[in-house]
Amino acid sequence: MDGQTSSEYEERLEENLRSLLDRFKSGQYKAPPVRRTYVPKGDGRQKRPIGIPTFEDKVLQRAVALVLEAAYEQDFLPCSYGYRPGRSAHQALADLRHGLMAMGGGWILEVDIKSFFDTISHSRLREILDQRVRDGVLRRTIDKWLAAGVMEGTTLSHPDAGTPQGGVVSPLLANIYLHEVLDQWFERDVKPRLTNRAFMVRFADDLVMVFANERDARRVWDVLPKRLGRYGLTLHPIKTRLVEFRPRSGGTKPPISGVGRSFDLLGFTHFWAKSRRGFWVVKLKTAGDRFGRAVKRVHEWCRRYRHEPVPWQHEQLMRKLRGHDNYYGVRGNYVALTRFRYELRRVWRKWLHRRSHRSRMSWERFNRLLKRYPLLKPTIGCQLQSRAANP
C-alpha cells in the first residue's frame, strides 16, 4: 500500500521498530487498509480475494500473532492442523488416513464454508476473544485491523465482516474462530450424542467429518447449518456433501453405485484400493482440479519465458518440479507425479517450438535436449504409513 519494501525498512531498522513499538503501546498506531488482489481459485474460472498489508503492518501482525499463538496453542484441539507450529497438511492427511483405516471406512461429511474469510462476524470474533484475551493494547490493535478497510483500485471500503486472506494474523484469527464454532462444539456437544465413532480433521477452513454410522452423519448434517448460522457462516449448498466411503468387501461390488466412492481434501483425492498384499487401504492421488491448475501454471510460465536461455528455463522448471513433489510426493501418488512430468515436457517443447520460425523444436531435437538437461525423476518424500484395514 505505502510502497515501502523490506530492504528500505531495514535501512533504519532499530529506529523503525522502536517507533512501531511506541505507537503500538500508546494506541497511536493506525492500521492501514489492505490492498486487495485476486488469485485463481479451483479450476481457474473463479478468483479468490487476497489482502496485502503494508510491510510494517506485517511486522506488527506477526508480533501480535506470536503472543496470541502462545495463549491459544494450549486450547486448540488435535483435530486442527492449519497454520499451527509443528503441524502440517501432510500430518492432517496421515491422521485422516489412519482414522479411516482403523474405522474400516465410514460416512464422510465434506464441509465447505461459503466465503469463510469474508464472512467472519466481527462482533462474534470479539466475543470469542473476550474469553481469553484481556490485554487492552492487543484488543485495540486487533479491532483496528478489523476496521482498517480494503483498498481495491482507488476505492476504499469498510466491510462489516471478514478478515482478509493474506494478512499475517488472519489465519490465527480464523483458527480461533473455528475452534469455538466447530472444534469444541464437535468434541463437547456432538460426539457424546452419537451412537458410534466419529472424528474430524480440519486444516483452516478445509475440513471433513468422519462417521461410522450414516444416521449420525445425517443428524450432524441437519444441525450444522444452524450452528454455523449463529456465527454468520453458511454452508456451500453444492460443495457440502455426504459420501459413503467404504472398501469393497470380499471382492464384491461396492455398496453404492455412481459417484460418492471418493472425496477430496487438501489437494488430494482419497479412494480405496487393494495393497500389494491384498488388503484394502486408503490411497491418495493428486486431485483433478489441482493437477489441471498446476499444468496451467506451467503452461503460462513457459509461454511467458520461452525466449529466455534454455539453461535458465531448465533450472526454473527443476525448482517447480521439486516444489510440486515436496507436497504431492506422497506414497501411492507416483503415477500422478509421472504424468505431471509428461505434461511439463509437452508444454516446454511446445513453447520452445514457438520461439522462432527459423529454429523449430521437433520431438527428436527436444529429446536430445533432455539428455543434456534431464528432468528430475518423481520423488516420494512422504510415506503416510498406516495399518491396513481388514479386507
Image (cartoon, rainbow, N blue to C red):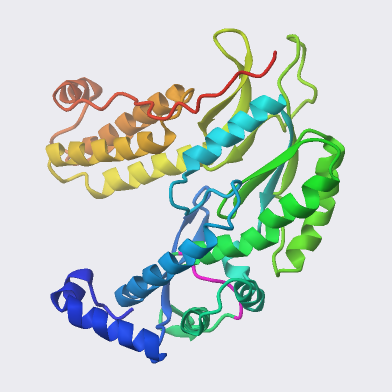
Q: Position of residue 191 (x, y in %)?
A: 78, 46
Q: Position of residue 171 (x, y in %)?
A: 49, 62
For the residue pair 115 and 312, the one nearer the viewer reads as 115
User: Is residue 163 inside the magenta stretch?
Assistant: yes
Q: Residue at x 58, y 41 (%)?
A: 265
Q: How many marks?
A: 0
For the residue pair 40 and 213, the one nearer the viewer reads as 213
Q: Residue at x 47, y 26 (%)?
A: 333
- 374 sits left or right of 272 in the view: left
- 268 sits left or right of 105 in the view: left
- 130 sits left or right of 60 in the view: right
For the residue pair 3 and 309, the one nearer the viewer reads as 3
Rendered view: 70 above or below 352: below
Q: Residue at x 73, y 56 (%)?
A: 185
The answer to whether residue 96 is visible is yes
Q: Position of residue 248 (x, y in %)?
A: 73, 17
User: Is residue 104 inside the magenta stretch?
Assistant: no
| Residue 319 quadrant | top left
Rendered view: 282 above or below 109: above
Q: Position of residue 9 (x, y in %)?
A: 20, 75
Rendered view: 248 above or below 56: above
Magenta stretch?
160-165
